[in-house]
Amino acid sequence: TFIIDFIKDKFDIENNCSIQYLKKEITDHLIQLFNSEPIDKDQKINEFITKLKKNIIKNTQEYLVSELIQGLYLEEEITFGDITFVPYSNENHKKIYENYGAKQNMTDLLIDNKNNESIGCIAYSKIIAIDNSKAIEKIDYKINQVLDIFRFYNIYENFGIYGNYKSFGHSKVTGYIKGKGFIFSAGVTGNKNKNLGSFKFTKERYISLQKYAFLNNLNKILTISENKRTPFQRKILLAINWFVNIIQEWENKNNIIFLFTILEILILVDSKKKGEQLFERFILLNYKNKKDRETRISMLKNLQASRNNLVHGGHCNYKEIEFNTILLDTHNLIMKYIEKFEIYSDITEIINIIELKKNELEINW
């Protein structure tokens, strides 16, 4: 792993190949290197890196990858970010690949003809990668980013990639034609997960949601390539991801740690006076009423004490009403950030406004 990280950082190898691919290439080269006669090892290593980079460029190709989504039901096709979701049926699943160039005999062979009632839709996209593992890793990351946004919108429902989710296990089936790669979800095993719900994303619901800045703004963020997103936009997506960790497992005692992680992502710039800054900024960003601010400060102090007990002592006991109140306020703060994703490029800009106006009752930021 150290060698892999060193090679990726030092020689700027593109992030299109999996760890398994790099491990195999490095292992094969090291065996040759140590079994050869005394040579200039530095020169051979540099030759290997040059060859590896050329192979990555040469062998990188476009894959079409699909995943079955359990518990999320659609009435018609929608596209969010780079991911397209279509209502689930075997016919729709086959059509995705046949429209991309796969032959019908391939889809008939690789896609099960039996419909699965727990599957709500199919998510798919094209992705650039050198091997199957990396293609799946990249597409699952993108799909889960979108699913996190849907979960954030509807916090009491749960859905996920069938096979990757909780206790499920699955395998992937691949095919190739004219330089194109196809990766199918297949071979699903295991029992239906009780934690997954049944969320209907109707056409009317989706259209009504598009009227609000929330969905459109997040869609815009996802369509921006990762290296071009602002630090503010990246923190919004990161906060949503941590928030979803909480709502997927309400009974997890570590949720109180996750909650303070979100607050630190949204509010803190440095670690100096961490607790004091966290409380003050949180109430200034969220509340105008003095009584509300005092109440929330008390809740935050109680929750932080419980969080510290858990981290340092392994146990904690906190009031659910306090936790849920601050969690809801955190959700609202993330929503405010989403509204302003094009106004600010970094959290520090908001913090600077707060610091200048913290003595005012109402702070417009």
Image: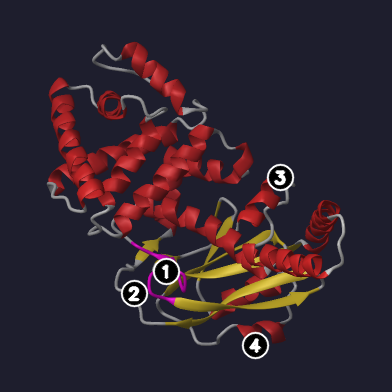
Secondary structure under badge 3? Answer: helix
Label pair 4/3, CB-CB below 8 angstroms: no
Which label's residue is closer to the chain start, 1 or 2? 1
Q: Where is residue 335 in the image (x, y as percent from the top left)?
A: 37, 38
Which residue is at a point 54% across and 69% down the rendered structure image?
Answer: 67
Measure the C-alpha gap from mark 1 to mark 2.
8 Å
Which label's residue is closer to the chain start, 1 or 3? 3
Label pair 1/2, CB-CB below 8 angstroms: yes
Q: Is residue 120 left or right of residue 253?
A: right
Colour mode of the rendering? secondary structure
Q: Residue furthest front?
A: 38
| Amino acid type indicated by mark 3 | Lys
Q: Where is residue 113 in the image (x, y as percent from the top left)?
A: 55, 87
Secondary structure under badge 1? Answer: loop
Find disc 1 in the rendering and name its residue.
165
Secondary structure under badge 4? Answer: helix
Q: Neighbour class for label 4 at 10 Å: few (<14), some, many (≥20)?
A: few
Find disc 4 in the rendering and name its residue.
109
Measure the C-alpha gap from mark 1 to mark 3.
35 Å
Depth check: 315 or 348 in front? Answer: 315
Find disc 3 in the rendering and name its residue.
10
Measure the C-alpha gap from mark 4 to mark 3.
44 Å
Q: Neighbour class for label 1 at 10 Å: few (<14), some, many (≥20)?
A: some
Depth check: 194 or 17 in front? Answer: 17
> Is 162 part of what is drawn in magenta?
yes
Label pair 2/3, CB-CB below 8 angstroms: no
| Amino acid type indicated by mark 1 | Tyr
The magenta segment: 158-168
Question: Quick one: quadrant of the C terminus?
Answer: top left
Q: Which marked residue is nearer to the observer: mark 1 or mark 3?
A: 3
Q: Can residue 284 be seen by looking at this rendering?
A: yes
Find disc 2 in the rendering and name its residue.
193
